[in-house]
Amino acid sequence: MKEYWTALASLMGAFAFLQGVLHAVFPAELRAAVARLLGRLTRAFSPYCYFDVTEMDGMSTNEIYDAVQLYLSSTAAPASGARLSLSRPLNASSFTFGLAASDRVADTFAGAAVTWEHVVAPRQGQGFSWRPLPEEKRRFTLRIRRGDRDKLLPAYLDHILAAAADIRRRSQDRLLYTNARGGAMDARGLPWDPVPFKHPSTFDTLAMDPARKAAIMADLRDFADGSAFYERTGRAWKRGYLLYGPPGTGKSSMIAAMANYLGYDVYDLELTEVSSNAELRKLLMKTTSKSIIVIEDIDCSVDLTNRAKPPPAPKPRPGIDGAIDQDGGAGAGRSITLSGLLNFTDGLWSCCGAERIFVFTTNHIEKLDPALLRSGRMDMHIFMSYCSFPALRILLKNYLGFQSDEELDRLGDAAAVLRGLEEWVDAAEITPADVSEVLIKNRRCGKAEAMRELLDVLKARAENRRRGSGGALTAPGKEAGGDNEEEEEEKRALESPKEGKEQAGIDSCGDGQDEEAEAKKQV
């Protein structure tokens, strides 16, 4: 054993002596040139080619490096044996994984295998700089076969950039925007005010027939994945949805479910805050891609039903000094027209962004101008009907805690109640909002008791409809008692205060002379 260690020490001494001789005889420049030559010869006969994606591109960050890091976070996370770094960016709702230093991960694209390696090396000392660089040099090295180069580049990098953008969007909190200031800009030059969008509605909890929900989800998925289709057909990458039906049937919940399903931001456009078509275009230009632009209750916002009829002249009203105000209030200068709204949804200005969905909601589709309903503007009309039995089953599972349809069917003593609900729900014409209210009030009484209470409510509503119609059921939307009509009138009064003020001015015109004299006395 002693002889073995003695021989090993002699061999190491010989290597150290030979290295010293080589350094003394051959200068450093010659050694570097020989190393480069050997590297070139090795790469020339290697079946692979390599590409470096550095973290810094001069003094700025490299966009491709960040995209590769996000893309590999989804690829490397399920890999076994890889050492991953864990992070959570600011305003993000999920964690991201990344490759640690000097670790590798394999990937495939278009049938070709690729390998990524994360290389981290210390940076040499740098002089004075107004923008100090990181202490370490980081880069990703891509290794691919030479025969796959034309097939992978640049298609593979485009795929990585698109996937990283999707991961970044889905990991961040979604936002709900409103134009509370009309078209005025804030300090950042934006006319929209954002708040976090935390609506919990999904297609799983939405009270609607499963077949109709599946059709809507398939249409949304085809739209989100249809970039190549819209480009090939020469159409703008946008789609319009019209949600119509009685109040309380889930139109707002449908919008929230669409946003949560696609991961899009929501822009709630309030037309009464927009003073002109120019402001409307400015608001559209400041919206982002992958978003849903919503105009709720479009029949109540502004008068767009008659294109030939000019807007009514403002009524003169006496001011505090006794002079007659010919402007008629602050709302007299509004000039949103039907053509401006149509250009907003289907004109040239609607093509200034991609992958956007326009959603209009209304309780009275018959009051809308036919130009708003044609194909290309509202591509899909979705009738939000009264609660059907399949939708009622979804609400029972949501509010009473049934885990599955099988558990709902195995009710024992309450099976007769479930059959009664199926029998009476269509005759009652009850909205999902009303069903939810009954279930919320009785959810602590037990599942069977809550269902019996709901059955009593359905029977009472059906009997009221029969008595109100003289023995025959009324048509949908014209229920006895006028609950929906009263709700509509109240909503119109709340959302159109200007019209109420103008009406008040009209009512007071009969006593115009008295008001003018009284105003002069006050002055």
Image: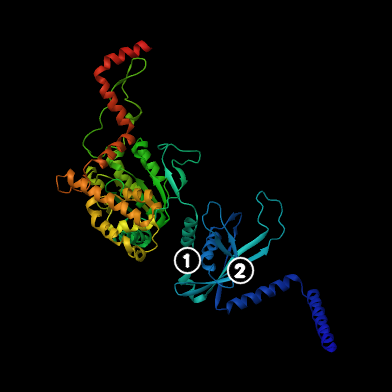
Mark 1 Cα shell of 10 Å, populated few (<14), some (14-19), many (≥20)? few
Q: Position of residue 212 (x, y in %)?
A: 29, 59
Mark 1–mark 2 Cα distance, whole angstroms, equals: 28 Å
Q: Residue at x 65, y 75 (%)?
A: 37
Q: Residue at x 77, y 75 (%)?
A: 26
Q: What colour scheme does the image use?
A: rainbow
| Vertical placement of residue 500 versus 456, above or below | above
Looking at the rendered structure, the secondary structure element under dot 2 is: loop
Q: Residue at x 31, y 12 (%)?
A: 517
Looking at the image, which residue sits at the far top? 521
Q: Is residue 14 left or right of residue 504?
A: right
Q: Which mark is residue 83?
A: 2
Q: Position of residue 394 (x, y in %)?
A: 34, 58
Looking at the image, which residue sits at the far front? 413
In the picture, which quadrant includes the N terminus? Answer: bottom right
Looking at the rendered structure, the secondary structure element under dot 1 is: loop
Q: Is residue 370 left or right of residue 96?
A: left
Q: Is residue 499 left or right of residue 162?
A: left
Which quadrant of the figure has residue 480? top left
The one of 251 and 476 positioned closer to us in this rendering: 476
Which quadrant of the figure has residue 181? top left
Residue type indicated by callout 2: Arg
Q: Which residue is mark 1?
A: 154
Q: Is residue 457 visible?
A: yes
Q: Nearer the viewer, mark 1 or mark 2?
A: 2
| Vertical placement of residue 499 versus 14, above or below | above
Which quadrant of the figure has residue 221? bottom left
Q: Position of residue 146 (x, y in %)?
A: 51, 75
Residue type indicated by callout 1: Pro
The one of 196 and 206 positioned closer to us in this rendering: 206
| Vertical placement of residue 462 versus 98, above or below | above
Give the mark nearer the N terminus: 1 vs 2.
Answer: 2
